[in-house]
Image (cartoon, coloured by chain):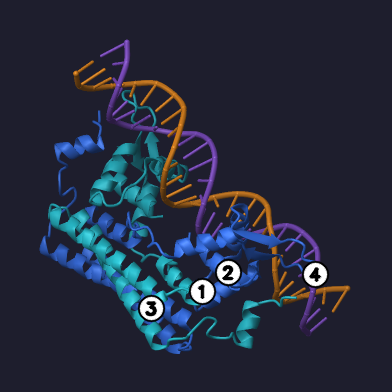
Chain colours: A cyan, B blue, C purple, D orange
Amino acid sequence: MSVRHALLALLSEEPKYGLQLRQEFEAGTGEVWPLNVGQVYMTLQRLERDGLVASDEASDEGPQKVYRLTDAGRDELTSWLGPPPDTGVPPRDELVIKVLVALRMRGVDVVELVQSHRRHLVATMQSFTELKAEADERDLGLLLVADAEIYRLDAVIRWLDSAEARLRQGVDLRFPSVPMSPLARRRRGLGVKR
Amino acid sequence: MSVRHALLALLSEEPKYGLQLRQEFEAGTGEVWPLNVGQVYMTLQRLERDGLVASDEASDEGPQKVYRLTDAGRDELTSWLGPPPDTGVPPRDELVIKVLVALRMRGVDVVELVQSHRRHLVATMQSFTELKAEADERDLGLLLVADAEIYRLDAVIRWLDSAEARLRQGVDLRFPSVPMSPLARRRRGLGVKR
DNA sequence: ACAGCCATGTAACTTGTTACATGATTTT
DNA sequence: AAAATCATGTAACAAGTTACATGGCTGT
């Protein structure tokens, strides 16, 4: 739902058209977050359907279809800004899944796998550091987006390290490590195979 | 694409059926990552369509439809495990977008907004720490997933702090901070409004 | 005039969500 | 027998991706 509201925000400045929205979105994120055009048009259609934007269809000259924010759109935007993003269920991180999977597969050198991923993450982090170094230091969008990615990658690396430490420590911990309690079985309702 | 391969991994141990896969997935992640059943069945259908799993349709007794991993599925699984997850384009983080949006909207107290989100993140982090404390320390899945979330939240908090520092420093930096170079205009192909 | 770009859109697909429908099997 | 739960599925939707189609405008 991020793009939806990002477009609303861009339209809150002044009426704009499709390609322009894509361009300003990418410029505002230091060209780090690409945004495909098709999604812009799709999102604009849905926003219009939901009454959050309106299009000035009667564009007398030029092929550009200009959208503007409605009052409902402005309300939606401000009420979206405050509340923190849903934190109920943490996102399923693919790398975490890979490690969990590797742990319960036989014949996989988990430590080697962890270190391989770690090397890749460090390199990626480095590339973002370089991106920042080369960039215009007044480009707040780029700085913030690059920082966000650097902090994120750093967290993943730390997690990998802590995971590796856990593995080296309690060596032959293997799934299923914890047999479910009868209560949990009942609650989750696992059936019986025949 | 994570769930897809997680299911393959679970099936690599032995043939299993739908609900069982859902249950084992959730148990393996310390009940922190729920997995809706519909997706399991959908994913199984696609996996079968792609020849990565096969179903023993002729289940003589019981309603359970058991799926097993094919050789192609095993290949897919091992070739998925090694390569690091796509790192080309960083994910669009909703909170980052909120801050970027707040920055270029007039009449929004960005610092207040940042601090409000920060408080919420700290509380969420705390809840995961408690979850770990209460949990069976042999539940590797829970520990790893909770750790991953804790590190992730910590990174977001750090980013918020650095962002706030940037704001306090270069106070009235406002978008659009960097006018695009003529070259960039040409490259991105921004048209002219009439 | 023709090539290339601007601008809008559609189509087909994947992953994921919630909600509902439908039998079969236990449990009470 | 009725209720609960097991187990499988479908429908409808949202958001996102890539690829393609189609005109209009511009530069040479």
The residue tagged 1 is A105
> Please, is residue C18 above or below residue B120 in the view?
above
Q: For the residue labelled by badge 1, is the local secondary structure a helix, a strand or a loop?
A: loop
Q: Amino acid at mark 4?
A: Glu
Q: Amino acid at mark 1?
A: Met
Using the image, tell me which numbered label, if any, was put on residue B147.
3
Q: Residue at x 39, y 39 (%)?
A: A54
Callout 3–callout 2 Cβ contact below 8 Å: no
Q: For the residue labelled by badge 4, is the local secondary structure a helix, a strand or a loop?
A: loop
Callout 2–callout 1 Cβ contact below 8 Å: yes
- The 10 Å Cα crowd at callout 2, few under 14, some 14 to 19, many 20 or more, is many
Q: Position of residue A158 (x, y in %)?
A: 30, 75
Q: Is residue D10 left or right of residue B6?
A: right
Chain containing the residue with disc 3: B
Nearest to viewer (mark 4 / mark 2): 2
Chain containing the residue with disc 1: A
Using the image, tell me which numbered label, if any, was put on residue B111.
none
- The 10 Å Cα crowd at callout 3, few under 14, some 14 to 19, many 20 or more, is many
